Amino acid sequence: MQPALFTLFLLHTWLRGGQGDLREDLTLLKTELALRLYQGAAAPRNETNIVISPAGVSLALEILQFGAQGNTGRQLAEALGYTVHDQRVKQFLHTVYATLPNSGQGTKMELACTLFVQAGTPLSPCFVEQISQWANSSLEPAILREPNSTSIGVNEWASRQMAGDNLGGPTWERGGGAFPQLALVSTMSFQSTWRQRFSSRDTQLLPFTCAQGLVLQVPMMYQMAEVNYGQFQDPAGHQVGVLELPYLGNTVSLLLVLPRDKDTPLSHVEPHLTASIIHIWTSSLRRARMDVFLPRFRIQNHFNLKSILNSWGVTDLFDPLKANLKGISGQDGFYVSEAIHKAKIEVSEEGSKASTATALLLLKRSRIPFFKADRPFFFFLREPNTGFVFSIGSVSNPLD
């Protein structure tokens, strides 16, 4: 079973006004948002494992758009790439969000967002109504931390939410700025099984070559399966293999991008990935029967998104003197004091018992193509029909 839980707060490009197909526009846009978010998060981490959830980040920024006005609203729209005040976009997203919890047989997916507001603050009825109807979102009262308070802060609250603890709202200390303040926490949960499961009996320790040349023995899952696969070339001429592994119900899949040349670092391919290239690759995949080798991996990351958002021009949101969120209550003084992202993903076969290895023998005897992720690779957890990217990341060391 493959669970993933993300806690967050985001992202690019402007929708072509009234031209083209809305679904296609948003599919490309959301993929581009995912790539930009990944690049912003990965840049300072120097080839370590990365996972981040664009779906939850986007949801949080959509919620803020309902209350943002003036320059603050413009900055959010330009960073996100669309506005929920566009009725076509609003209706499309509302329809998609409404269907996510029932994504398909054997798959459970849910997006949710909670906006914590200083207790006792009067709120605009229009804003409250919009939030309550948007992707399982809600408003909750928050309490400023008093001296010697034992209440948990927002960082610890997010960590314990990811661990499954059922907690009340977080608290945070009052800084030097004005209050009331806001804390926005968005979560995306996903749980499913593969359409064709890996058998734990076929998992064995095999070599995995890390980015710096270190060779590790890692638990490598194996199956012979019918998959979607293609071999492509990026704009710089790097050859890549692209494999799509569907989950039960075929509504969500894991897309893997692996440099075909073992001497080509993943870092040479990543800068050339764009929404249009990913769209071309995924549209060109063909059914193939293959030997598939994929390491078990588990990644957990913690990000502060303020620096990423600031680099995209979202600055007023965090400034108590410039933020314009009057749509929330009609009052000045609201600004966002926390932009937290915690992400976790685990990919494995069903169960983790000790196994007897037969995969190497199968590979030597087989004449069919194979996909062997025995070096750093890139991945998307995505909904193919809408292009929603629920998580995006890369694996540099499956044992980290």
Image (tube, grey):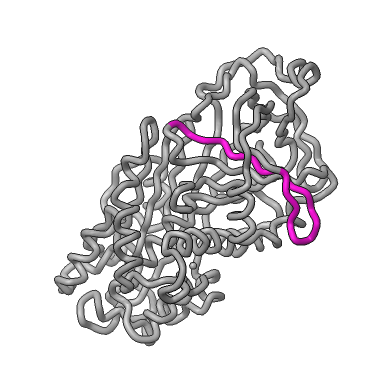
Q: In which quadrant of the rendered image does the C terminus lie?
A: top right
Q: Quadrant of residue 321?
A: bottom left
Residue 144 inside the magenta-drawn segment: no
- Asked if 315 appears above or below 20 in the picture, the reply is below
The answer to whether residue 176 is seen in the rendering is yes
- Asked if 280 appears above or below 307 in the picture, the reply is above
Position of 252 with respect to 258 (left or right) is: left
Furthest residue toward right: 263
Magenta-drawn segment: 231-248
Q: From the top left corner, tell me how far across and down residue 388 is, in percent.
A: 46, 53
- Asked if 56 appears above or below 373 in the picture, the reply is below
Q: From the top left corner, tell me how far across and down residue 221 is, in percent.
A: 64, 26
Residue at (58, 64) in percent of width and height:
36
Furthest residue toward top: 356
Q: From the top left corner, tell me how far across and down residue 137 is, in percent.
A: 27, 57
Residue at (27, 75) in percent of width and height:
180
Position of 11 with respect to 295 (left or right) is: left
The answer to whether residue 400 is seen in the rendering is no
Position of 297 with respect to 388 (left or right) is: right
User: Could you say which is closer to the camera, residue 361 or residue 309?
Assistant: 361
User: Could you say which is closer to the camera, residue 283 or residue 83?
Assistant: 283
Majority secondary structure in the magenta region: strand
Residue 242 inside the magenta-drawn segment: yes
Q: Quadrant of residue 243?
A: top right
Number of marks present in the image shown: 0
User: Could you say which is closer to the camera, residue 110 or residue 175?
Assistant: 110
Residue at (80, 57) in percent of width and height:
237
Position of 111 with respect to 231 (left or right) is: left
Residue at (35, 50) in percent of width and height:
111
